[in-house]
């Protein structure tokens, strides 16, 4: 029996993604090359006006009522004429609607910038366009490509996570952005994976526990343990108490938080029906660190035979789409990690003495990779809830 649920939803997403990728090729075919290259070369103009709109929190201030640029400028502390020109470009990009000359309202896109909505990605826009994240792109990317060094480290003199440890404001923004990933990726990790096979999820690198919260809301039998850096965990429980919503209080009663170090030690499993979840964690590590992290988790899972589940992107072997290639470049800019192909992941798993047992497809960018120890692994034991997956007839990866 496979851990895959709702396979039709995953297939529909893959079909729509292929259609979207095909449509993205049309501007290159239909636009004169020189003009198209100029469009691409000046695309940062669009990201910067979006960033300023997020900084001013225009969408939240607009809320559900139209407003003139003059009234809006008064509320956000801006020059009316300059703000009107900013909004004019944003409307041309499809962000906000212009109802009449100088009068604007939110639309489907701009609503996702509102701070008061659960589907907001405002923190992600702010984080990716912050000085910390944008300056390495502008000032150090070429040197990083030439030398193989990480542009973020070249810019700031520290690796990303070390920098966050010593810069609390950016650390908080980064954590908030990671908590908004569900708005970007959807909830398919909670609905299209068979969490009924488990009693507890150990969410390693889970930040404040947004993914655990989404899983617990949909699976009332589950408990969750969120594990992350001490600095992040200190604020996690209080964060949820301050962000009450549907089902949060009940789910919080089933959540615990504990500091851990993925490269050294994580909490041990207490049942064969535990599942270690590492969601978009290992793509930030180089291969050696991935192997070390997987061995750490395997040791913690070993005695009880708990499962190990990775939520990661699988890069195509060739002809990557723009989304996956862009995510990979972001990894190159900020970390020593990368988005990996299936073959690259399997080489990492082999070094960690783990075997890829199943790939669960999602209606999202990522996939869930289910692991167990390779045959003859005497150091970790089985990583399967209650019994070996093979005994349950779990499908091999397609």
Image (cartoon, rainbow, N blue to C red):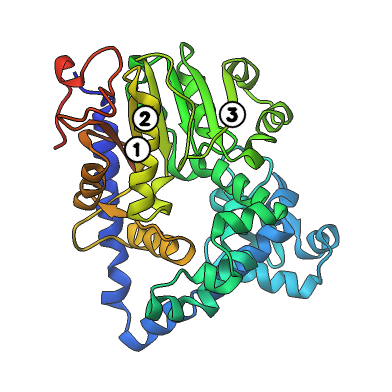
Name above or below for residue 33 compared with residue 386: below
Q: At 23% across and 30% down in the image, what residue appears?
A: 373
Upstream in sequence: badge 3 or badge 1:
3
What is the x, y in percent for residue 275?
A: 38, 24
Outermost residue on the front side: it is 378
Upstream in sequence: badge 3 or badge 2:
3
Secondary element under disc 3, as helix, strand or loop, is strand
Name above or below for residue 270 compared with residue 51: above
- How packed mark 3 is, by other alpha carbons closer than 10 Å (few <14, some 14-19, many 20 or more), is some
Q: Are marks 3 and 1 in contact (CB under 8 Å)?
A: no
Name above or below for residue 295 compared with residue 45: above
What is the x, y in percent for residue 15?
A: 24, 46
Task: Answer whether residue 106 is visible to the viewer in this image.
Answer: no
Say which quarter of the image contains residue 357: top left
How many numbered markers are drawn?
3
Q: Which mark is residue 295?
A: 1
Secondary element under disc 1, as helix, strand or loop, is helix
The residue carrying mark 3 is 258
The residue carrying mark 2 is 299
- How packed mark 2 is, by other alpha carbons closer than 10 Å (few <14, some 14-19, many 20 or more), is some
- How packed mark 1 is, by other alpha carbons closer than 10 Å (few <14, some 14-19, many 20 or more), is many
Q: Quadrant of the C terminus?
A: top left
Q: At 81% across and 65% down in the image, what residue appears?
A: 70
Q: Are marks 1 and 2 in contact (CB under 8 Å)?
A: yes
């Amino acid at each position: 029996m496979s851990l895959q649920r709702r396979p039709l939803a995953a297939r529909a997403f893959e079909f729509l993604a292929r259609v979207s990728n095909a449509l993205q090729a049309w501007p290159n075919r239909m636009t004169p090359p020189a003009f198209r290259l100029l469009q691409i070369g000046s695309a940062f103009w669009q990201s910067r006006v979006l960033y300023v709109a997020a900084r001013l929190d225009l969408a939240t201030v607009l809320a559900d009522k139209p407003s003139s640029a003059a009234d809006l400028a008064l509320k956000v502390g801006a020059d009316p004429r300059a703000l009107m020109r900013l909004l004019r470009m944003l409307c041309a990009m499809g962000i906000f609607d212009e109802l009449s000359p100088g009068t604007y309202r939110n639309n489907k896109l701009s609503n996702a910038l509102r701070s008061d909505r659960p589907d907001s990605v405002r923190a992600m826009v702010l984080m990716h366009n912050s000085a910390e994240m944008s300056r390495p792109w502008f000032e150090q990317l070429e040197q990083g490509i030439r030398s193989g060094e990480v542009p973020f480290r070249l810019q700031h003199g520290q690796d990303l996570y070390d920098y966050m440890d010593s810069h609390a404001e950016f650390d908080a923004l980064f954590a908030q952005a990671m908590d908004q990933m569900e708005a970007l990726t959807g909830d398919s990790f909670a609905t299209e994976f068979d969490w009924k096979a488990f009693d507890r999820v150990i969410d390693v690198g889970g930040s404040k526990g947004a993914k655990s919260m989404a899983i617990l809301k949909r699976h009332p039998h589950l408990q969750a343990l969120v594990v992350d850096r001490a600095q992040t965990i200190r604020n996690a429980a209080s964060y949820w108490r301050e962000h009450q919503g549907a089902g949060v209080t009940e789910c919080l009663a089933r959540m615990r938080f504990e500091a851990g170090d993925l490269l050294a030690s994580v909490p041990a499993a207490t049942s064969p029906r535990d599942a270690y979840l590492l969601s978009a964690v290992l793509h930030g590590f180089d291969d050696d660190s991935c192997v070390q992290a997987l061995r750490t988790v395997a040791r913690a899972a070993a005695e009880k035979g708990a499962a190990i589940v990775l939520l990661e992107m699988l890069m195509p072997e060739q002809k990557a789409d723009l989304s996956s290639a862009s995510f990979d470049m972001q990894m190159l800019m900020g970390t020593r990690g990368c988005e990996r192909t299936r073959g690259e992941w399997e080489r990492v798993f082999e070094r960690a003495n783990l075997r890829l047992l199943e790939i669960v497809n999602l209606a999202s960018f990522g996939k869930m990779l289910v692991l167990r120890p390779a045959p003859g692994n005497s150091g970790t034991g089985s990583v399967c809830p209650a019994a070996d997956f093979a005994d349950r007839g779990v499908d091999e990866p397609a």
